[in-house]
Amino acid sequence: MSNPDYRLIDIKLDERTILWRNADIEQERRVAIFDLLEGNEFKPIAAADAGHHGPYKLLLGVEDGRLDVTVSNGDDIQIDAFQVALSPFRRTIREYFAICDSYYQAIRQASPGQIETIDMARRGIHNDAAELLKERLETRAIVDFDTARRLFTLICVLHIKGH
């Protein structure tokens, strides 16, 4: 067996499930994917147990309140698929959107101290969401904290609705 390479080399969002986006959201998506691909730990348990030791490609979508996760190998052959209930994230996603709105407004008109306070709260919510996501994924995929954090950002992108 070759050495395992438990990481993501490509990630895409199911365009059919993205409800709305603007330039800020598109930038968040690009940054999250770039950072994720620069460094991540992702081990889909069923695929690894079946002898697929990475690297992997990921397709994320949202359907009926669940995160659809499709895992493929480097040759684009699907090797795993699973769903994660998003109901435990509803409140966190709402809070995250609200604090992000406050943060973007603060950047335009608040003092540096106020911006820093809001940013600390934003990071705290994001960190809590990453821990929850790690827990929710643990029976399906092993991810490190930074990977969970960036995946949460992408889940948010999939949830954004037009105002």
Image (cartoon, grey):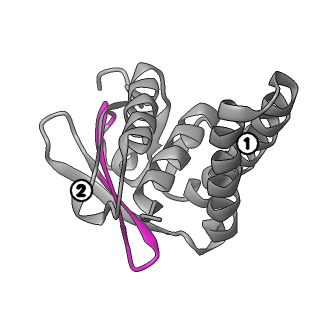
- Report whether residue 101 is seen: yes
Relative to the observer, which residue lies in front, 150 or 77?
150
Tally the marks.
Answer: 2
Q: What residue appears at the point 63 percent right and 65 percent down from the top-left corner? A: 89
Please tell me whether residue 68 is drawn above or below residue 74 in the rendered image.
below
Residue 42, image x, y percentages: 46, 37
From this view, report whether residue 78 is shown above or below residue 40. Answer: below
**Amino acid type, mark 1:** Arg
Q: Main secondary structure of the magenta part?
A: strand
User: Is residue 135 among the parts visible in the rendering?
Assistant: no
Amino acid beneath label 2? Glu
| Residue 48 on the magenta segment | no
Q: Which span is picked out in magenta?
A: 53-70
Q: Is residue 152 left or right of residue 89?
A: left
Q: Which residue is mark 2?
A: 15
Q: Is residue 107 left or right of residue 155?
A: right
- Is there a contact, CB below 8 Å, between mark 1 and mark 2? no
User: Could you tell me which quadrant the N terminus lies in?
Assistant: top left
The residue positioned 70% from the left and 59% from the top of the image is 95
* Residue receiving disc 1: 122
| Whole-number angstrom distance, CA of label 1 to CA of label 2 | 26 Å
Secondary structure beneath disc 2? helix
Near mark 2 (Cα within 10 A), the count class, few <14, some 14-19 or many ≥20, is few
The extreme bottom residue here reads 64
Residue 146: % across, % down? 60, 32
User: Of all residues shown, which one is farthest toward the front?
Assistant: 109
Marker disc for residue 100: none
Provide residue 83's location: percent of width, then percent of height. 42, 67
Q: Residue at x 52, y 38 (%)?
A: 150
**Which corner quadrant of the image does residue 20 belong to?**
bottom left
Label 1's element?
Answer: helix
